[in-house]
């Protein structure tokens, strides 16, 4: 018998018992960034992983979807599973067409395996440049992967931190697919929203119409943090101007997600109900909310299906 996985010391489990959000998402809303972890007994974590999480199953993910009033999910391969995509594909397969997947692949993957992933609902690959999460992969290997997935109509999801953007710029802007940036390019929200670092990120989107961004992870980016324990439902104030600015400037190229089950958080685990209540602060009108939660993710992940709320 194999030993059960032991969580990384200090690992925070996801918050079981999220509140009911006050904000009601539009019909057909998509949680476009979330993960599953294992369960480890069924889908072992990868030997090369940088952390060992708690379990977070597909049944728990879809229970959260229903609780929050969402309809669909995009399940992003978590780094703790390396390039073994079985847990993510199992989750997508268990959603009856209401989930898509983003995989991690290596350059030696066979064409028939990419095609099988497409049939299972995978629509992209993630390139991760965060050193605490993954080992370095040479750029020529990544560009080779991008060229091979482009004919399938897939996207490349990129994860990096704002100080690394200048060095990565030429690589990102040469990608031959739609490109989706995780978590707004991880700005330092202690810096001004109209400062040079965030301006560079906006230039990336302004000059490259194939580049989109997820306005996600206030809980990860915030310095001011969650609300005090006084019932106030306005957490993560410092992140809101950054997300709102992107939603208002690029309303047709932003998507939103919970990031459940919130890997690698230190200090606190968010209440996903509160995260949903951040949405009307970053997308203040019904038109922007419809684009952010429905029209845009449907265009990226279900382009052949009718868009809820649009006749
Ligand atoms: C996120 C962020 C993180 C982790 C991962 O796949 C992962 O391990 O994505 C992180 O630690 O910042 O998007 O979930």
Image (spheres, grey):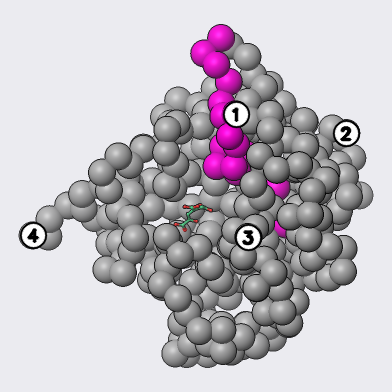
**Mark 2 falls on what kind of element?**
loop
| Image spot of residue 236 (x, y percent) | 63, 30
Residue drawn 89% across the image and 40% down it: 287
Badge 4 vs badge 2, beta-carbon distance below 8 Å: no
Pointer 2 residue: 285
Left-right relation of 86 to 216:
left
The answer to whether mark 4 is within 8 Å of ligand 1 is no
Pointer 3 residue: 163
**Mark 1 falls on what kind of element?**
loop
Pointer 4 residue: 1
Which dot, 2 or 3, sits closer to the camera?
3
Highlighted magenta segment, given as a residue range:
213-230
Q: Which of marks 1 and 2 precedes in the sequence?
A: 1
Image height of 84 relative to 228, above or below: below
**Mark 4 falls on what kind of element?**
loop
| Image spot of residue 23 (x, y percent) | 72, 26
């Amino acid at each position: 018998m194999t030993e059960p996985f032991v969580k990384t010391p200090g690992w925070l489990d996801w918050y079981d018992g999220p509140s009911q959000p006050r904000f009601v998402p539009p019909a057909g809303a998509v949680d476009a960034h979330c993960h599953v972890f294992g369960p480890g007994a069924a889908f072992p974590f990868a030997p090369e992983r940088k952390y060992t999480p708690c379990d977070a199953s597909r049944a728990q993910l879809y229970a959260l979807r229903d609780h929050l009033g969402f309809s669909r999910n995009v399940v992003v391969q978590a780094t703790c599973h390396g390039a073994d995509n079985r847990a993510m594909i199992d989750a997508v397969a268990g959603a009856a067409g209401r989930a898509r997947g983003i995989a991690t692949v290596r350059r030696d993957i066979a064409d028939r395996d990419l095609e099988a992933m497409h049939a299972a609902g995978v629509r992209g690959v993630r390139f991760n440049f965060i050193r605490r999460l993954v080992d370095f992969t040479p750029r020529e290997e990544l560009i080779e992967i991008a060229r091979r997935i482009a004919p399938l109509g897939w996207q490349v999801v990129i994860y990096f931190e704002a100080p690394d953007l200048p060095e990565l710029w030429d690589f990102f802007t040469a990608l031959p697919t739609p490109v989706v940036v995780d978590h707004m390019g991880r700005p330092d929200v202690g810096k001004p929203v109209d400062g040079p670092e965030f301006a560079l990120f906006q230039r990336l989107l302004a000059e490259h119409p194939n580049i989109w961004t997820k306005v996600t992870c206030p809980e990860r980016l915030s310095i001011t943090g969650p609300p005090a324990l006084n019932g106030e439902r306005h957490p993560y104030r410092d992140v809101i101007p950054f997300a709102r600015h992107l939603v208002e400037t690029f309303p047709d190229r932003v998507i939103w997600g919970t990031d459940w089950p919130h890997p690698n958080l230190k200090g606190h685990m968010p209440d996903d109900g509160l995260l949903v209540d951040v949405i009307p602060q970053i997308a203040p009108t019904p038109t922007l909310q419809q684009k952010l939660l429905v029209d845009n993710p449907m265009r990226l992940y279900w382009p052949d299906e009718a868009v809820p709320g649009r006749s």
